[in-house]
Amino acid sequence: MNKIAIMLILSFAVGFSQTNINSGASFLKVGVGAKNISTGDVGILTSDVTGAYYNPATLTLNTQTEFHFTHNSWMNDVTNQYFATKFILWQIPFAFSISNFRIDDIEVYTNPGEPEATFRANYLAANFSTAIKISEKLSVGSTIKYLYEGIYTNEATGYGFDFGGYYSNIFENVNLAFSLQNLGSISEFRAEKIELPTSVSFGADYQIPFEEFKLDSKFILATKQYFNNEPTHFHFGTEFAYDNLFFIRGGYFTGYEAKSYSAGIGLNWKNIQFDYAYSPFDYSLGNSHIISFSYSL
């Protein structure tokens, strides 16, 4: 385990905040789904099940049963597994997801020489979401989540809530979304009081079809503001699709010290969707490679 990985563990413990306020469960700041991450980590307008991670109101955007899995080789020795499923019950959409970050083989030393033991750091969020339509165009949704952090013999648990709204076609081919994430609390970590990374996001997308060429284009703009006085983050994304079969995506985001852009591709075949995203980090932290598979009924 190199020094950079040790720094990553400490970063998870005290948060990625750019202020002096400690933030627990900071892995919640990391996006899910290769499609979302490749388009600037904007998920609050996404119509598949991964959208519920960002904005539970998006569950009303389709009535399909879905299964989704993402593997994220994040930075250096950090990996993330994300599983989500969506189903319809009593004509109401529900979604359940689990996101787990893990750092393996962390070495323990009390004296110079060989390591005396190894341990694992784990960070987990289990989410349950639902949504309803208020009108033909307006939907609202909510999420309740269980949170866990464990590093060596230290543990912290907590809970959180998300709330979101989605308004379709406010203008022709223009959709709006709103999300309030990570309200709640988490227990003390090594006697340190910590806070969840509560944030508010607003976003819009604009779709331009080129039917004669079987092409569709989408342009996305979103803002995210954390409640701990971090600077406002602006996220920009774009997607170009050919015949709903092949997708090329790109994204750019501001206000983050170690990352600024992302890119990716996607392939849709019948009911199976494959997506890949790439997002590099500065300061020799490595590159993030995200692979996602989705199946819908």
Image (cartoon, rainbow, N blue to C red):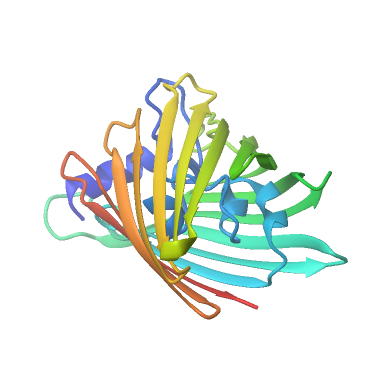
Point out residue 223 in the picture as x, y percentages from the top left corner. Answer: 49, 31
Instruction: Look at the picture and state if 231 lies above or below 215.
Output: above
Q: Nearer the viewer, residue 66 or 219?
A: 219
Instruction: Look at the picture and state if 25 lies above or below 105.
Output: above
Q: Nearer the viewer, residue 36 or 5?
A: 36
Residue at image location 51% in from the left, 27% down from the top: 226
Q: Quadrant for the C terminus, please.
A: bottom right
Residue 151 visible to an observer of this rendering: no
Residue at image location 21% in from the left, 46% down from the top: 285
How many circles with numbers are drawn on the protein? Answer: 0
Q: Residue furthest left?
A: 113
Report which quarter residue 203 is drawn in.
top right
Q: Is residue 108 left or right of residue 297?
A: left
Point out residue 117 in the picture as x, y percentages from the top left corner. Answer: 28, 62
Point out residue 270 in the picture as x, y percentages from the top left corner. Answer: 53, 80
Q: Residue furthest right?
A: 90
Residue at image location 37% in from the left, 52% down from the top: 38
Residue at image location 25% in from the left, 49% down from the top: 5
Q: Is residue 171 left or right of residue 16?
A: right
Q: Is residue 132 left or right of residue 168?
A: right
Q: Nearer the viewer, residue 77 or 187?
A: 77
Q: Residue furthest bottom?
A: 270
Residue 102 visible to an observer of this rendering: yes
Instruction: Look at the picture and state if 146 lies above or below 178.
Output: below
Q: Quadrant for the N terminus, please.
A: bottom left
Point out residue 115 in the picture as x, y percentages from the top left corner. Answer: 20, 59
